[in-house]
Amino acid sequence: MTSGIAHTYSAYLRRLGITEPLGAPSAEGLFALQRAHLERVPYENLDIQLGRPAGIDPGLSVRRFAAGRGGYCFHLNGAFAALLETLGYEVTRHLGGVYKESDAESAERGVSGDHLVLTVRVGGAEYYVDAGLGDGPHEPLPLREGSYEQGAFTYSLERPEPVEGEDRPAWIYRNPGSSAPVVSFRSEPAGTADFEAEHLRLSTSESSGFVRAFAALRRDGDGIDALRGRVLSRVDPVKGNTERVLDGPEEFYATLEGLFGRELDDLTPADRAALWARVSRAHETWLETRRG
């Protein structure tokens, strides 16, 4: 590893709040890294909203995160996989798909390819690792069938029954009520090239939810912060959920930078005005649908 690349990974680790040397790969280390990633690197689509989506090359994502940016699943899990490998972890990337609860049967029959899933083997065990869902598990899940509690949240993993002649997924993850309630994924390894076409569609097509609406999410040990358009919400099963509308651009950008940890030094005044105008138009459209 060259000194420049090593410096970038060091900056990435500092972004995660890690400044001391890490020991050998361990389950405890893996869990700590995922918690830190979810708490400090937001799931967000700011650049897609501005019409300049970043590529999904893991090296590019690592540099962006080191500089204070966020991203969505292809960026988040892509860079996290690269970081884990640099630290000595055994990582496998998998083709996955995200489905609504109403379309759960589709998840059992195949994989759409719109999600990058990671599995990590360490200490003789294998884990489902996902820093790219926004409101997914705070810590890795053991890669075996069962239900898993993390605080007040419950997740599950299951293996669909194989059907002769059908290319069914190897695993299905469930998190009812979340923005990604069902995720299916294959067992075979995948590479960055396997996600390029879907990234192009998700980041440029007018039919894509990432193009239609702004979102930023951040997970911590107690709950989930989400900014969808101008609506800031907090999901906390213990203290109770909250929701409010941000008043103006100053509060919007202060929330992005403060609560979500997204550095904004890459935005010009014109960028800020354009994004706020876009978010406000979408908010008005959303209000009209509610009134209707």
Image: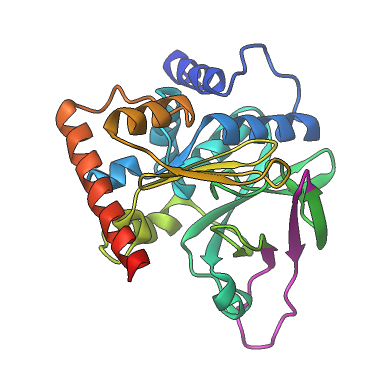
Rendered residue at 22%/47% (across/down):
278
Q: Nearer the viewer, residue 248 or 210?
A: 248
163 within the magenta span:
yes
Above or below for 210 versus 25: below
Q: Residue at x 28, y 47 (%)?
A: 279
- Say whether residue 62 is left or right of residue 269: right
Residue 24 place in picture, x, y as percent: 76, 24
Q: Is residue 54 visible?
A: no
Residue visible at 53% across and 64% down?
97
Q: Position of residue 60 (x, y in %)?
A: 38, 34
Q: Is residue 136 above or below residue 20?
A: below
Q: Is residue 260 in view from this perspective? A: yes
Q: Bounds of the magenta span?
A: 150-173
Residue 203, placed above or below residue 7: below
Pick out the residue farthest to the front.
291
The one nearer the camera, 14 or 170, is: 14
Return the x and y of residue 204 as percentages of the image width and height: 26, 56
Q: Is residue 279 left or right of residue 17?
A: left
- Quadrant housing residue 223: top right
Judged from this view, the residue extending furthest toward the left is 270
| 57 relative to 113, above or below | above
Q: Residue at the spot x=50%, y=37% of the render?
A: 79
